[in-house]
Amino acid sequence: ATNFTNYKDITGNQVERAKNYLRRAVSKDYVTSRKAHVDFFKQYMDRVSLDLGIDKYAGVTTDMRVQNFKETKDDFLVATYFRFGRYLLICSSQPGGQPANLQGIWNDKLFPSWDSKYTCNINVEMNYWPAEVTNLSELHEPLIQLIREVSETGRESAKIMYGADGWVLHHNTDIWRVTGAIDKAPSGLWPTGGAWLCRHLWERYLYTGDMEFLRSAYPIMKEAGKFFDEIMVKEPLHNWLVVCPSNSPENTHAGNNGKATTAAGCTLDNQLIFDLWNQIITTARLLGTDAEFATHLEQRLKEMAPMQIGRWGQLQEWMTDWDNPQDVHRHVSHLYGLFPSNQISPYRTPELFDAARTSLIHRGDPSTGWSMGWKVCLWARLLDGDHAYK
């Protein structure tokens, strides 16, 4: 146990806490404890099943199946990955605790990879993609509490770094709910983490229909939206409203001989703010509040940079057509509009849908770490269109 109570309070008594944990543990025998654990786990795990067909590679070890996935199209591995994602969330994101971080509860190091923090330019969000859609809504709660807390600490960062109202979160946070620019420029400069986390508030409402939750979440969403309304600027070529400076998380573009990261109007930023502002507008009308602000955001949406198709048929990652068809970077940030968002559709936006398909075909190795999971989700959207994951 530790003395940590929350990011503002470290007055807990770690000795008494540890004694209480032990006292409760030894009061039950092993068989009883194990059954209670299994029953507790199964109440979540058994809510959902996924069958994608027979196991064609039963004699192949999991590590090799992952390595060969690009060639084998191993559907049974996809179903296993689906179950594994739910298992991880069940084990590492229980209500009342901390959210699932980069190592979950399995970190065994004093100095773990990426400090075992919450990387907000894809990783923490991806941890929680199973929450609502696979019937684990209660396990979303630790992340939602983190969002509430970074919306408090992010006010200081917005004011000091940008001279703006509202709140901001860059690409990373931790148990102390830091919100400033962390690490090096190719990752730390990105200022749009708050917009992405707000989507989780909206998803919670969409899946539960809980108006009281939406009412409590609205001020967080509104203040995140206000920040971008104040800091965005007009770029000189098209007069589009863009975030600057920013980057397309952790990737380089064709400027400065392919070594530059800083840019204006990156596609991911545009997509995230498009979602955030539309969510604020819809929520304001559902709650019967802030009509003037909603109307203002509607006008601002018309001024934003659109998604664009580049010279080789790809969905552009940047406002300028800088995409390299040989780029195999594991982040495919500009495909946020395809998934987890639904801005790109084979029915509503067929040209953008085809461009997203082209981008995904050219990008990354789907057998590498978390990128495999994202690409599985993206391919599902490409194959099934608007019906995926309903």
Image (cartoon, rainbow, N blue to C red):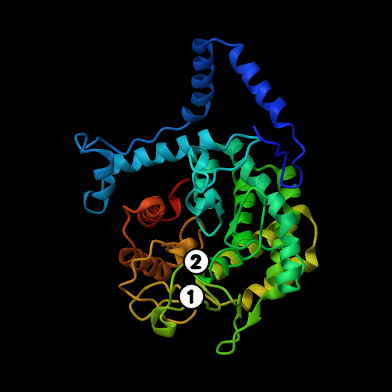
Where residue 125 appears, as percent x and y from the top left, is 54, 52
Front residue of this view, candidates 389 and 104: 104
Front residue of this view, candidates 326 and 252: 252
- Look at the picture and state if 260 lies above or below 43: below
Left/right placement of residue 351 relative to residue 198 reads left
Amino acid type for the residue under numbered disc 2: Pro
Front residue of this view, candidates 311 and 25: 25
Rendered residue at 68%/45% (across/down): 145
The residue singled out by tag 2 in the image is: 249
Q: How many labels does the image show?
A: 2
Left/right placement of residue 190 relative to residue 314 reads right
Q: Residue 96 carries which label?
A: none
Left/right placement of residue 6 relative to residue 309 reads right
Alpha carbons under labels 2 and 1: distance apart: 8 Å
- Label 2: which secondary element: loop
Q: Residue 261 carries which label?
A: 1
- Look at the picture and state if 353 lies above or below 24: below
Left/right placement of residue 128 relative to residue 174 reads left
Rendered residue at 51%/48% (across/down): 111
Mark 1 Cα within 10 Å, few/some/many (few <14, many 20+)? many
Mark 2 Cα within 10 Å, few/some/many (few <14, many 20+)? many
Front residue of this view, candidates 32 and 320: 32
Where residue 119 appears, as percent x and y from the top left, is 54, 55
Amino acid type for the residue under numbered disc 1: Thr
Q: Can residue 207 be seen in this view?
A: yes
- Look at the picture and state if 196 lies above or below 387: below
Image quadrant containing the N terminus: top right
- Label 1: which secondary element: loop
Rendered residue at 54%/17% (across/down): 36
Where residue 63 appears, as percent x and y from the top left, is 28, 43
First in sequence: mark 2 vs mark 1:
2
